[in-house]
Amino acid sequence: MIAIIDYGAGNVKSVENAVRKLGFETKITSNLEEIKQADKVIFPGVGEASTAMKYLKLKGLDVLIPTLKQAFLGICLGQQLLCKFSEEGNTKCLGIFDLKVKQFPATDIVPHMGWNNLIKTKTSLFEGVSDEDNFYFVHSYYCEIGENTTSECDYILPFSATLQKDNFYGTQFHPEKSGDIGSKILENFLKL
């Protein structure tokens, strides 16, 4: 079973539909035992960092998530909350990735919304994906680049499009909204 963490953020149903379309059983849950026992965990996200972290703390998910050993995928806000700090609401996050989440400077159109390709891809999530493939982004905050960056995107400035450390993976883009190529990323994750 694939646990999809329900923490009051939007987009959980889109992720559930995308995973089920690939033939995997899912459960949308914030139950600690169900998450612990899941084969894989997906942490989707559309929302605001400080509100999401308050919910995680309320449910004990802030303590549980860093201890999980199964493959774990954070999407968009889900990836950002795996970092140590977000400028959005001056929020202390989960600290799995030793990176800060920063707000895009208002030198171009913000939020970054639309299709972009990635550079410097180096993770098993990208098996069968080419440098010409594009992914769907929608965000006003970005993860800086660091040692856990496995691909970059350039919008106003370079940022971490994907992250990976041990069993924790993150995508700033939305694979569930990125068509067939996004499905390939999800499938690669689910087959880890």
Image (cartoon, rainbow, N blue to C red):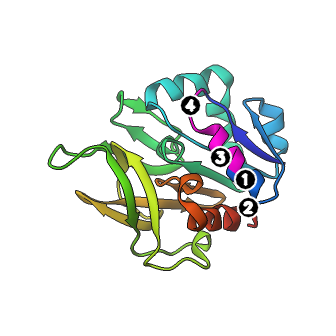
User: Which residue position holds label 2?
Assistant: 190
Q: Nearer the viewer, mark 3 or mark 2?
A: 3
Separation of residues labelled 1 and 3 (CA atoms): 6 Å
Q: Amino acid at mark 1?
A: Val
Of 102 and 118, nearer the camera is: 118
Please report contact status of discs 2 and 4: CB closer than 8 Å, yes or no. no
Residue 36: give x, y in percent of width and height: 80, 41
Please report contact status of discs 1 and 3: CB closer than 8 Å, yes or no. yes
Q: Nearer the viewer, mark 3 or mark 4?
A: 3
**Is disc 3 surrounded by few (<14), some (14 to 19) or many (20+) residues within 10 Å?**
many
Separation of residues labelled 4 and 1 (CA atoms): 18 Å
User: Which residue position holds label 4?
Assistant: 9
Question: Horizontal placement of 11 versus 142: left or right?
Answer: right
Question: Horizontal placement of 135 versus 40: left or right?
Answer: left
The disc, 1 or 2, on the residue closer to the chain's N-terminal end is 1
User: Which residue position holds label 1?
Assistant: 19
Does residue 31 lie above or below 40 as drawn? Answer: above
The disc, 2 or 4, on the residue closer to the chain's N-terminal end is 4
Please report contact status of discs 1 and 2: CB closer than 8 Å, yes or no. yes
Magenta stretch: dominant secondary structure = helix
Q: Residue furthest left?
A: 107
Q: Secondary structure at mark 4?
A: loop
**Is disc 2 surrounded by few (<14), some (14 to 19) or many (20+) residues within 10 Å?**
many
Q: Is residue 94 magenta?
A: no
